[in-house]
Image (tube, coloured by chain):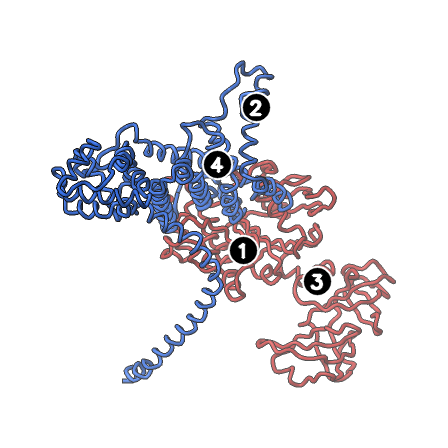
Amino acid sequence: MEAGMVMPAPALVRFSGIQKTYDGEHLVVKNLDLDIKKGEFVTLLGPSGSGKTTTLMMLAGFEVPTRGEIYLADRPIKNMPPHKRDIGMVFQNYALFPHLTIEENVAFPLSVRNTNKAETQERVKAALRMIKMETMAQRRPGQLSGGQQQRVALARALVFNPQLVLMDEPLGALDKRLREQMQLEIKQLHETMGITVVYVTHDQSEALTMSDRIAVFNDGIVQQIDRPDALYERPVNSFVANFVGENNVLAGTVETVDKQYCRVALSAGGSVMARAVNVSGAGTATSLSVRPERVVIVPEDTSSDGPNRLPAKVQNTIYLGDHALAVLEVAGNAEFMVKLQPGAHDSLRSGDSVFITFRPEDCLALDPV
Amino acid sequence: MTAASLTSADAPIEVPLKRRLKQAERARQLKALALVGPLLLFLLFTFAGPIAGMLWHAIDDHEVRQVLPQTVAALAKWDGKDLPDENAYAALAGDIQSAREAGTIAVAAKRLNYAQNGFRTILTSTARNLKAMPEPGRARETLGKINPAWRERATWTTIKDAGGPITGFYLLAALDLTRNADGAIVSASPDQAIYRDVFGRTFLISLGVTLLCLILGFPVAYLLAALPAGRSNLLMIFVLLPFWTSLLVRTCAWIVLLQSNGIVNDSLHWLGIIDEPLRLIYNRFGVCVAMTHVLLPFMILPLYSSMKAISPAYMRAAASLGAPPLTAFLRIYLPQTLPGIGAGSLLVFILALGYYITPALVGGAADQMISYFIALYTTETANWGLASALGAVLLLATILLALVYGKLVQGQQVTGGMKN
């Protein structure tokens, strides 16, 4: 086969023209098309009510699409009951069976498949070793901490080698430190076992940490599907820019468009150069998006700082250990964040007048909010 | 050395800490006691008191002792092998004389008649015919002449056994047992032995009603727990509706429905399913139907509360792990409802054990439960001893069952109950 004719890896899961409504009036999921490749870690990210959980439930078989078809390994599964789908699932509240021991919980998917005793025992043992909980096999879920319970739920969803693993905000009930540790563990399991994972979360940092690709949901529509870095660096619209990572928004009007760049007149006065990502043309409203770490504070108005230079007033500074934030008032936005090196915040006093600069390529002109 | 000095420094602090903890606990306990105090007092007077009284009545035996004190005292020394000596006869004659004046003969006669049929006649005829105290040394002869029963050992054994102050007579009678003339415990004569049968019937009907309630209540409770709040509230009102009408009205409604020319029989006849009206009431069937209807909410509510606590995520998890619906139900759902099944069954069973009005109204003669007899002895024949003894046996059986249930539930918590 010639180069350039490389076939894309076949999709393990394919959502094709999926629509879902509960009440017959509002579409919770509007026309979803999404391919998930074998071995991929795909996160469905979005605020609550955006349709991400409904999408997951349709894949698991607990909800039926109103229109469209879902394919799993090229077989339509719209009308297949959940227990025949061979999909492991991890729930937000663990859903460990309280009347069974840890061992019995992990053995459950094997025993309903009539796996023989010796193999069951071996696989349960291996699964418990994988989550480092061999010693707790005889305990009951109620005797474990939240993190331990979620590990067991993970082992239970993986022990029968499902072709796909779904996770519905599995870390939502854990505290921050444990959550970060579990993120790494799940990521590691994904890499060592080569499993395909569809993960639902509303936590964008979790999505950025773990995913191969992220599908950002809003209002029943996938706004953007991309790799984490692409999502962060090149959001296609204001929603994605605001939802993924910290973001500063400045309202303005497009004055001129020149290929990839445009000049935007800010509503509060002044003008900047920005990358024209999602603008309709000269004279239309736009929202500028600038990441806090791409902005530099300069004490005085020096003309060597490039085309984008705006006056700012320091509101206050926030010390965060590994870095610090300056909250500024810039062009009518009273919560304009700028990331500083730790220590740099000492020289700023609230009420100080300063200037900020940023490169045109770090400033995106997007659809107006 | 540092460790030693540390422990010695810590030791004196530990004691006051414990004491302070105790003080803090005591204040809380007093507060708790004050909160439950009024109800505790109420229950003490209206529940614990009467129960203790009932248990006492079951073994109390003071009537004969009170009416025939000298006779009882004289018989205390009697070995029971032959007829008692002259002293006992004289004592009896004296007791009868004074009892006749006090008008208390009937009290003793009633008690002695329980133990030996016809004793009432013996005592009252003796009292009637004993005009004056017999001459000293001739009491045995005089009494024997008035009623030959005084020449029989059994007559005297009966008085001695009823001499109190406490007796196992009523409790034995409640279990169809009695003492023969030699004091050995034997089965009562077949015409008097009815209570074992009644107890058996009571437990059987209660068990049947409990099973019926479970079979009918489980799906309803499941529906209640599964429906969205609005509709489940509406359904709950229907479940609780029976509580808004009196027990008597509900039971009578069943009479209207089930009698020979009632709605059920008429409909079946009209549909051509039957030619003759079915006998649906004044038998075991009617009792079970009416009692199940009345007791159903007591099964549904505990079941509902245990099912409500089962997150739907468990069934979803089971399905996602590959369990078909029936397997998921049997292995995941059902075991988690066991506490509710246990609580509901125990509640219904114990309530059914004490049922009185419903079997009395819709049951036949062979369907009367133990409460009917307890009521009969308290209100009709005023045989408090036997009524209390029957009550005590019922109470004991109920407590035993509750203990067994408690053990089962406890065992379940340790072993996880039903697995697979």
The residue at 47%/65% (across/down) is B34
Give the spatial CA distance, label 2 vs label 1: 57 Å
Which residue has dot 4 on it? Answer: B357
Q: Position of residue A197 (x, y in %)?
A: 55, 51
- Amino acid bearing label 1: Pro
Which residue has dot 1 on it? Answer: A170
Quarter residue B45 falls in: bottom left
Which residue has dot 2 on it? Answer: B264
Callout in the foreground (3, 1): 1
- Amino acid bearing label 4: Ile
The numbered mark at residue A241 is 3
In the picture, which chain is red? A
Quarter residue B253 falls in: top right
Report the side of B152 relative to B195 (left or right). left
In the picture, which chain is blue? B
Query: Are the two marked residues, 3 and 1, in contact with CB atoms closer than 8 angstroms?
Result: no
Give the spatial CA distance, label 3 vs label 4: 75 Å
Give the quadrant of the N terminus of chain A.
top right
Q: Nearer the viewer, residue A173 or B123?
A: B123
